[in-house]
Image: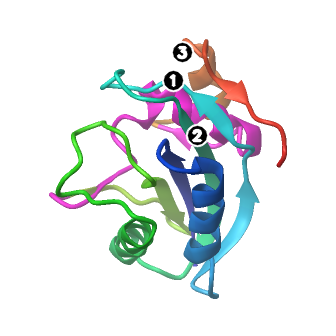
Amino acid sequence: MAEAVLSLGGNLGEPRATLARAVEVLCADAAVRLLARSSDYRTPPWGDTDQPAFVNLCILVDTSLSPHDLLARARSVETALGRDRVRERRWGPRTADIDIVSYGDAAGDVIIEDPDLVLPHPRAAERAFVLVPLAEIAPDHRLGGIAVRDLVARLDTSGITRLTSK
């Protein structure tokens, strides 16, 4: 078994309901077990800013899937929830986006650099929309050797709002 951090976000349709469904489907069997889930956060768009605000959250899971199999599951869930990677614009609006932030096993964090997957996620430490939700559930988790709480302190978190429970 390994522990993985996943970041989820979306801004089309009913993002909170879509992301709740994404977590359910991702963790629908013993291969991916939910350990912790952050609150939902309203976050400003990143990259392409001409679009609605996003809803973002992070989950911590225990998984028997390999990193590539976990990525395949995440992509399958995105597709099932209406994401069309072929037609969407880069950093544009989407129903669901699921990224693996980190993946670790008993030997430590897995490092992968191939065309399909880079771990740990190469830009997670720069993205407040990932780090703020992650800091809620795993402030001591380390990315690039730095605790998430310390990474958050370095970023502009203005515009990020924790949403109340539904």
Disc 2 on helix, strand or loop?
strand
83 or 132, which is in the foreground? 83
Residue at mark 2 to residue at mark 3: CA–CA distance: 18 Å
Q: Is residue 148 above or below residue 5?
A: above
Q: In the figure, 81 relative to 8: above or below?
A: below
Residue under label 2, please give it.
Answer: 55
Which mark is nearer the camera, 2 or 3? 2
Give the spatial CA distance, label 1 vs label 3: 14 Å
Q: Amino acid at mark 2?
A: Val
Q: Earlier in the sequence, mark 1 or mark 3?
A: 1
Q: Quadrant of the N terminus?
A: bottom right
How would you rate the neighbour count of disc 2 (Cα within 10 Å): few for under 14, some for 14-19, many for 20 or more?
many
Badge 1: few (under 14), some or many (20 or more) residues near its Cα, within 10 Å?
many
Q: Earlier in the sequence, mark 2 or mark 1?
A: 1
Numbered badge on residue 44: 1
Residue type at mark 1?
Pro
Residue at position x 24%, y 48% from top? 88
